[in-house]
Image (spheres, grey):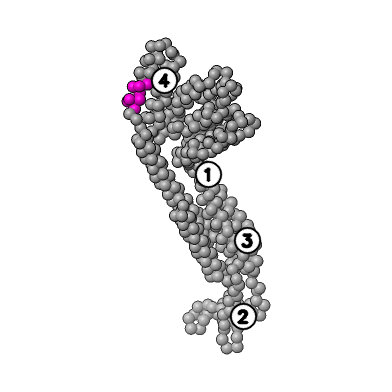
Amino acid sequence: MHSAKKRLWIEILLHLLFWAGVFYVLTSLDNSHIQIYARRPGPHIARDHRDEAGVSTYVYIILLSLALLFYGNVFWVFRKVIRYKRGVVRLSICTGWFALVFGTNYLIDGPLFNQANPDPVPPPPQMRARIDSAMRAPHPDTGFFRPPSDAVNFTVRNWLHMQPVILFAFLVIEGIAIGYFFLKEWAKSELRQTQLQANQLSTEIKFLKSQINPHFLFNTLNNLFSMAQAKENDELADGILKLSGMMRYMLYDSNEERVPLGKEITYLEECITLNKLRYADEEVTVTFDHPGQTADVRIAPMLFIPFVENAFKHGVAIGQKATIHIAIVVSGQKLIFDCVNTDYSFIKKMEMEISGIGLENVKRRLELAYPGKHQLSIKHESGKFMVNLEIDLS
């Protein structure tokens, strides 16, 4: 935690130094390009006077516009356009944002620029005649034409003529924003991958520590299944068979980073069947809606089961009627999971548990498996406990 805060403060300091450098460059351009010079006549020698003022207001506006362009791209525009697959759409959005900021700066800064750099007062007719005469007469030594030493010489700058320089500054900031954003995303991706690998390694170590011989376990379940069939207890045999399938899925299939949605649905169905064995038929009614065709859909395993187990554990009471509705919907590149169950007086216990280790584990796995591509909502209202999870599968 201390290291993360230190990196954050270093990053903030680097940003401040960067913008301080940009401000210095802008003020340097302001002093070197937007000036008015006057050559004042004297009795024996011509002197140069430079009319200087503080930093112009429009310089601050340009700085704010550049900062808006940079941080708007980094924290909003690029995060949006990266989700689109078509390059034309991405380019159009980025170009639109650039044009909006640049155009706004042009419209706001124009009057401020003209106010800070008014047009020079033309010289009186006598002085203008002397300037014209001097411009027509060549220098006696060099032969080149030159104005007289006491002529008033103004350097005039127009806001429209300044736009190539301003545009170049905006393009430079745009390029820096692109580089900064993708470097940050690359660093986040590397960190996320490292954390995911560490999490998987930790899970495997914990599993190995608590693992019993799976062959012994499955052989035992097969023996129990055969004994239940021999005694013609079909319900018990079916429960043992489903338990065997669930454990096989947990031990082997769920180790993959992505599994077919069909297998996850089958696992949930078997979990529902086994949980219903603990209650009478009139005590709990369960509906599970899911798509029939899921061949092309793959998801991270074991994401939905904590919500289903909590719905049975805390949403069903012996001697009371309870309902549990579970639904999985796949629409395009989006998967939606809903779990709604009846709420009883001890639902507070459920809220405490589901907001503890179980929910934190699910949230952590979602952050690692679907960073920025999921939304989890948990609500308790109208006598119902509702869970809604949306995942972007793209």
Q: Position of residue 18 (x, y in %)?
A: 49, 61
Res. 164 visible in picture: no
Which label belongs to residue 161?
none
Which residue in the structure is indicated by mark 1? Answer: 80
Badge 2 element: helix
Q: In this rendering, which labeled residue sits more in front, label 4 or label 2?
A: 4
Would you call the spot at circle 2 few (<14 residues within 10 Å), some (14-19), or many (20 or more)? some
* Distance Cα–Cα, label 4 vs label 2: 112 Å
Q: In this rendering, which labeled residue sits more in front, label 1 or label 4?
A: 4
Residue at the (51%, 81%) spot, across then down: 139
Residue at the (60%, 72%) spot, across then down: 53
Which residue in the structure is indicated by mark 2? Answer: 130
What is the three-letter code of the residue carrying label 1? Lys
Badge 4 element: helix
Q: In this rendering, which labeled residue sits more in front, label 1 or label 3?
A: 1
What is the three-letter code of the residue carrying label 3? Gly
Which label belongs to residue 240?
4
- In-front residue for pair 337/47: 337
* Distance Cα–Cα, label 3 vs label 4: 80 Å
Would you call the spot at circle 3 few (<14 residues within 10 Å), some (14-19), or many (20 or more)? some
Which residue in the structure is indicated by mark 3? Answer: 110
What is the three-letter code of the residue carrying label 4? Ile
Magenta-colored segment: predominant secondary structure: helix
Q: Check if mark 4's residue and mark 2's residue have beta carbons within 8 Å.
A: no
Residue at the (59%, 54%) spot, across then down: 103
* Distance Cα–Cα, label 1 vs label 4: 49 Å
What is the three-letter code of the residue carrying label 2? Arg
Q: Check if mark 1's residue and mark 2's residue have beta carbons within 8 Å.
A: no
- In-front residue for pair 141/170: 170
Above or below for 66 versus 206: below
Horizontal relation, residue 260 to residue 58: left or right: left
